[in-house]
Image (tube, coloured by chain):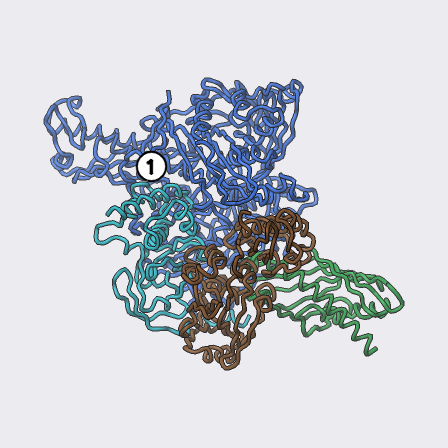
Amino acid sequence: MARATEDAASPRDDAPRVDSWEKVTGTAAYVEDLPDPPGTVYAVPLESPYAHARIVSIDSSRARALPGVLGVLDRNNLHEFNLRLDALDPLDPDLLATDKVRFQGDLMAVVVANDLRTARHAVSLIDVDYEILPPLFTAEASLAPDAPILHDHLGTNAIFEDSFAWGDVDEGFAQADEIYEDVISSPTVFHHPMEPIGTGVVHWTDDGIEIWAPSNTPMRDAAGVARVFGIRPERVRLRVPTVGGGFGAKKVTREMIGALALSRRLRRPIKLVATAEQSFAVAVRHAIEFRSRTGVTRDGRIVALDVDLLVDCGAYFTGGRTATHNACIGAWGCYKLPNFRVRAQTAFTNKTPATPHRGTGKTQTVFSVECIIDRVAHRLGIDPVELRNRNVLRPGDRVADVWTVHGEVTPVNIPPLDVDIPTLMQQAVDMLGPTAPANGSSGGRVARGRGVALSLRHGSKGETESQAAAELATDGTVTISHNAADLGQGIYNMIGIVASRTLGVSQSQVRVEKPDTSNMLAFAGASAQRTTVEMGNAVHAACTNLKRQLIDLAAETRGGDPNDWRLEEGKLWRGSESFELAELVGAGGGVTLRATGADEETYPHDKAFGLFEHWAPGVAAAEVEVDLDTGEVRPLQYTVLADAGTVLHYNSARGQLEGGAVMGFGLALFEEMRYEEGQLQNADAFQYRLPLLRDMPPTMSTAIMESGEGPGPFGARGIAQTSIPCVAPAVANAIHAAIGAPISSTPITPEKVLRALGSLESQE
Amino acid sequence: MHVDEHVTVPLALGDAWDFVWQVDLLAGCVPGCTGVKMIEQGKHYTGRVADRVGPYRVEMDLDVTVQESTAPEMIRVLVSGQDRKMGTTQRMDLTVRLVELGPAQTRLDIGAEVEILGKIAALGQFVVKRKVTDVIKKFGENLRLACTEVKRVG
Amino acid sequence: MANLRPFRVLQPTTLAEATGALAQYGDQARIYAGGAELVLLMRHGLLEPDILVDIKRIPGLNAIRTTGDVVRIGPTVTHDQLEHDAGARKLLPLLAEAVATIGNIRVRNVGTLGGNLCFADPHADPATPLLVHDATLTLTRGESSRQLRLDEFLIGTYETAIEADEILAEIQVPPLPVGFGHAFLRIERYHRPTLNVAVAAIRDDGHVGAARLAIGCVGPKSVRLEDLETRIGGLTLADACRVIGEAKPELTELLDPVDDGLGSAAYKIHVACALLARGLTQALGPS
Amino acid sequence: METSTDSPATVQTMPLTVTVNGIVWNGEVAAEEVLLELLRERIGLTGTKRSCESQVCGACTVLVDGKPVSSCSFLAFEVGGRSVTTVEGLQSGDRLDPIQEAFIRHMGFQCGYCTPGQMMAAKGLLLANPDPTYDDVAEWLTGNTCRCGCYPAIARAVLDAAEVTRRA
């Protein structure tokens, strides 16, 4: 079955990633690097310094009076801009905060001036009177009976309930020898791409709207902008330059839309230059509290799992439904459970609106489930790997036969498992080398431990189609256009590989465009690790159609039956006679051939899982060293495995696994937006701790299985989100093994370790 | 955050009460507070405070409002101010309870619920919390000195 | 971009000129020795000086000299310079090790010892080992100068004994007594130390002959622990470590730690004691 | 509010002569101008990136006289008479620096935003220590954040580049 591409000393020799040269020479142009269009002026937002406050008054007169200021948009003149504010999703943030500010960084006003310095200064001249209200920083607090209501018109802070179940948990608990209760929580964290979020250029021209911005979802953003300004979508042209990371956070921001409103008056291009601090107010991950009851038999079979999820979606519901639903359909981990139930309550808080975040809803639930498995193992005195083997889904297993989704009983329409998790798990464990000698780096008492974690994600198709176009120019080069923004994953490289392999031309003959919504090619956006499968299939289809046209043209112009022709090595062949593409299209009267294609795979639709593309397992094993005196945790070894179906570009696949793992170490050990003492305490690079090279285990091994059974081009599967969820549980379980005590939340700080050890008097 | 401080002053309960009940005198004991004006007797006062938190200079107009009082035992005032330029807001819910220790000795139990919001967070919680603790300590000390002064001249 | 609020730069070539400028401009002026800390606060809008007095043009201030048995460090000597200075490495290995842990290589390339001490950020490294070295400082007004012990100089969070018109002219660091071993241990979670300890000690047939202990970052400033030092003198290492472990209440009293994002006061004191014991063990070396 | 109403206009400019990537640049800089602004907005070298502006993330790392500094917080007038190297100055003509080649070979980048800073920090390391161990690399590059998580590949690339350079 699956062939493993083992981590080798020297990587499999791929062609260099297509954007290598521009990225190592500093010539890759990110939006801030683009030369200012002639007449560019600058916009700066005024953001709320408070998490929750009533806006008593806002007075921009001193700002307007400042020489060089061209315009101010605030709640007092908002009505003059005749914007279709109702066109914004009612659960998304309003364009401006008008009655209350609901999170730190909520947008109060946008100032446009001739230069950035003046605009920033003008913002400091806007006088606002706030009546500070008590902030709500946890879902629990906002669901308390006496809690202030964030959105008065909704009358409640409880915004969304979801549930998912099969079997009968009560029956399950009746059969159980032991029932364990656990509470495990995952905090709000920030995506923190290195390129600040919110930098962009917007311009209202006579021909429509032009936007240059890093966006994960260009088509959706352009359509949204069109709705707000009441113009046709094709009159909004959004171009995506090189993007400095996203992880779910990059989009056309409300600040950009505010600037557009001013550009409509000024008819000038307006540039926004976001700071790292402002970025913390754009997007974060949902904080989730996972409360569970687990029924087990003495021999280690899990007979029932009953979960209650408390999801904190921040001040608005942006992306909340997906996160909560993903959390629900992931809350069972990857185990064969006869009886399962999850009920989720999502609530507003005075925090940055939560959005999709790499592995939305999964990083939190996988952490919880996998920690609970180890807790059960320790309680029953069974080896955690063995306990997993006794309960894990095996190839051919179905999750369930019928289930209840949001109260509705429906048949299970997702396929049986087609990946071999136990084998992957064993390989992950075997790949851990012998324990390195305890080096005296700490000089103190240390304990070592190993832990494993499993995750089972799935690829799911976006609600919109995935389209691409392939065009053959008279010079014989092929250009692929699409709207799948490369946030850094190597999407354009993947597209180039699929195109060249499909067409039988060299990669150097293929040019991959960057997203430009004027091409009107649909794509839901790079998320749910759908891009390789869906966009890959779309590119494959477009190129197949182009190939057909080419061969027909060849048969037409050079005679013979289309079946006599083939496309290989970048040339058209009939028998042993070959023609350059350029030669042929040139002869065709200088025609350029253009073909479009879409992902036409038919995916089963399931009430819970939506359009189901494929199973995507992730497996990891970690070894850590714990300093028993200080609680410091030092990762020693980490192995991570996934099944890529077919590897299209080894370095990119490995980069996704390693990159997800590195981000996972951040979630495991460091990352948390600390809302304390009435405000967000660490919204700056100094106090929000990202994982650094020094934090990484010196040995990180990856193995990529190639089962060849993926639904994507040439059998590919998505892997982008398989490695991030496993790190926190693998590390927590390794710590549990080392110190004999469980950890209940991330980030796993040294203090939490000391408390687990009982070295500090309890608190919190 | 909550800070408690206790000082003993050489005044009889009644005299001590007379002092704290003159809210302008009480507010005057807030470190760095100057120019306290009475807006409405026993209810509303204003002043200005200038102070440093490390290298960071805070200047704000203070608004002092009496929330509740029970002569001669307890007074609760809300001291709030905003430094617009630095984008910093301070709110202190200050309670002073008077406990008679002897004919000329009264203990003042100071309880302050303090909230400092804004850009100052960039200095780190550590700095802000420590500063608040120091401010309340100093407030207690000022109160003690002022009362001793009253005793001397009185 | 950074968009620092505009200011003027004065570049005096003598200490007298520099202090003159401070006397003239008072609060509006700030000494610019390396800028690592200063520019950071200016960029956050927490400091808005009208004038920077750049003392890097004053001859000699970036020199490390050894006279007699004292190493004399100029205020504009960078952390990187100090880390790699042959003399400092030989005579002050404890300090050289400590400054090598500051921030990152870019910060060490611009940040200066003088700037670091005068800034008095509670979460800094150099002061802790310097206390163990019994370092002294020269503050000058140009014509008149005064000498202070480091523990007299450090007052509190961002507070030192330096007067508005004074400049730190030199840091004098006597090497540790012959036979003393040393250790510098620190915990870092963010980009400044969570806490650090510096220890120097000498063995006296199986016992602690003498020891110097300092802790930084737990309280408002780095402090020497003289009481504890005397109490562990003459004890076996094991007993000394026990005494240190039992010192938590008095350290809490002395350092007055607060709960914050770095951890609870209890956590800080616990780890401080653990590192002191560990540092003592390392400083005494294998018996 | 005094200070906030005063104008943000520059009050002092200074003449500056600096060598950037081997080319002499002459001009006036405002006292408050930082090196990153000079490089990106005046000289047009946009390879150096702006991110945290707090000397923490390293995206803006350039070499001044061969040593890495955070150009976001380094006052421009300070480079007078000195030599600045940015990512654009790494290669000579079309010949890439061994560090750049190693970053390509090992794919030591994904989104690429931190890459110029990573490579300049690595350059500074190899200038200071041509034969670094993994720990040396980890220690030195810990000042450069990569959110895509390319650390393992970056470490491989830097060690590889060091070896190639030594063999050359």
Which residue reaches farthest front? Answer: C205
Q: Quadrant of residue D150?
A: top left
Q: Quadrant of residue C216?
A: bottom right
Residue A641 horizontal side relative to residue D28, left or right:
right
Residue at 35% x, 30% y: name it.
A599
Q: Percent x, y for residue C235?
A: 65, 51
Which residue reaches farthest right? Answer: B103
Colour of chain B as rendered: green
Q: Percent x, y for residue D49?
A: 37, 54
The amino acid sitting under disc 1 is Asn
Q: Which residue is mark 1?
A: A651
Colour of chain D as rendered: cyan
Residue at 45% x, 21% y: name it.
A415
Q: Which chain is brown?
A: C
Colour of chain A as rendered: blue
Q: Chain of mark 1?
A: A
Would you place residue D103 above or below residue C104 in this image? above
Would you place residue A48 above or below residue B51 in this image? above
Q: Percent x, y for residue A689?
A: 50, 49
Q: Percent x, y for residue A410?
A: 53, 21
Q: Residues within 10 Å of mark 1 (few under 14, many from 20)?
A: many
